[in-house]
Each structure stands twice: as structure tokens, then as C-alpha cells.
Image (tube, rainbow, N blue to C red):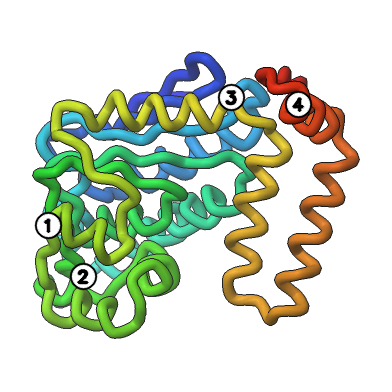
Amino acid sequence: MELETMRYEVRERVAHLRFDRPEGANGVSAAFARDLRAVMLEVEWDDRVRAVSVTAEGKVFSGGGDLKEFHAAGDALPRAGSELIIDFHAALVKMNRLPKPFVAGVRGAAGGAGLSMVGAFDLVVSSDRAKYTMAYTRAGMTPDGTSSYFIARHIGLRRMMDLTLTNRVLSAEEAEAWGLVNRVVPDEDVDQVTADLALQLATGAPYAVGRAKRVVYEGYDASLEVAAEIEAVGIIGAMATDDGKEGIAAFLEKRDPHWTGR
């Protein structure tokens, strides 16, 4: 897999994805969107990978859409934008559907499409110095990157409208209080905490971790009866696995479980 804007490697069942275009603030360009989609396909089909750690090189996690590239497109911008969006949105939808958790570590800032990505990750570790802003309308644009779906659910409709229309900048502490990020750590610890959290998830029971992700996402907007059925299918499926039986036995025997992925 050849990537232009990011680096990817697998260690100890964790895929480590690192955005690597700091000179462009790790902006979402056409190449970035293509790379992100390619990575999602790689994660999907690599049985070694059980969790993904996502971090970024440089001072900014992602500054959002690559406005220099957009400007250079001139009158062809709508077509170029459409091609980019197809890859970008396909990557984020695929990420959500994969039964493997994605943990992001944010340093510096996440703006525009960068913030949209933050909303789409399963867990987010934030630097205590990080800043978060939508910034779309400031550039005459409207939200994308699944932000209207994920971020609105994380923080609520009223706060989402505030971020979207006023381009308010959130501190890390505000982002945590609003439910946008999971935990705030010292700036120098972000990458390590993110990797450690991904490794923790990667060493869990594969079916249980992947299915639990689906149960939460699918049950969130469902009716009570549908949510209950989603939960029933998930836990009965877990009971049918070797790992499910092992987990129960290990808990009762007060020992660490040995997961086989079966």
C-alpha cells in the first residue's frame, strides 16, 4: 500500500496510522482522502489488526480541508470537491462499520474536516493544549465529514449549532466537558496514551469488542424494542464463541483470559 500523506504500520495487533503532511497542516486534500480510504480497506482485510491508533506529525492534527488545493481548482472546484468527498466520506463510513476500534490522539488543533474526523473516531485522547473549531462557514463552506451525524450526537443539537454557525473555538477542557473527547492528557503524553489505549483494546476478545462497538452505534438511535433485540443478538453471539466461554471461566477463576479469536 503506497500512501502520500500518511504512514501506516502494524505492531502487536495495532495498526498505527500517522498523518504525515505537517507542512500542509495535515489538511484533507484529494490525496489525503484517497489514502484514508485505502487505509480503511487495509484495516478491514488485515486479520492481524484488532485496533487502530491514529495520530499526526507536526503541530496540527488536521487543519481541515486543503483550501490551497481548493483555490487552485478554480472553476473545476465542484467536480474536484465531489471526487474528494466520495473518498473521504467512504473512508469515514467504512471506519464506523469496521468491527475494530479506532483511537485518535489529537495534538495542536482539529478544525473543519479535522474536527469532523475527531467526531467519527470511536475514542479520542486530547492534548491539554488542543483546540477544536468547525470553521466551515468562515471559509464560505458548510459542514462535511459526517460531522452533522457524529458530532451532533456527541454534544447535542444546540451546541452543534453553536459550533457550526459561530465557529466557536473549544479548549481541550471544554471539548471533554461537552463529550467531544474522552480524556485530556499532557501534550507530550498524547501519542503514547493513544497507542496504549489502542493496545488495550487490541488485546480484548475480538468478537466482543467489535460487536460491542456495533451494539452501541446501532442501538443509539433505535427504538427501545429494536435496541433490546440488537443487544440480544450481540450477547447471544458472544455466548456462542469460545472466547465468550473462556471469559466467563476466567472471571470466575480469577485469572487472566486467553483469547483465541474463536
Q: Which residue is mark 3?
A: 203
Q: Which residue is mark 2?
A: 75
Q: Residue furthest right?
A: 240
Calculate the distance from the C-alpha at mark 3 to the C-alpha at mark 2.
50 Å
How many discs mark residues in the rendered view? 4
The amino acid on which the numbered mark 3 sits, given as a three-letter code, is Thr
At x 86% / y 35%, what residue is drawn? 241
Comes first in the chain, label 4 or label 2:
2
Give yes or no for contact between labels 3 and 2 (Cβ–Cβ under 8 Å).
Answer: no
- Judge from the rendering whether residue 100 lies leftward or rightward of residue 229; answer left or right: left
Q: Around disc 2, counting alpha carbons within 10 Å, would you say few (fewer than 14), some (14 to 19), or many (20 or more)?
A: few
Mark number, residue 171:
1
Image location of residue 238, percent across then percent down: 81, 43
Q: Which residue is mark 4?
A: 261
The amino acid on which the numbered mark 2 sits, given as a three-letter code, is Asp
Calculate the distance from the C-alpha at mark 3 to the C-alpha at mark 4.
10 Å
Comes first in the chain, label 3 or label 1:
1
Camera sees residue 262? no
Q: Is residue 66 above or below residue 231?
A: above
Image location of residue 105, percent across then percent down: 29, 38
Q: For mark 3, give the secondary structure.
A: loop
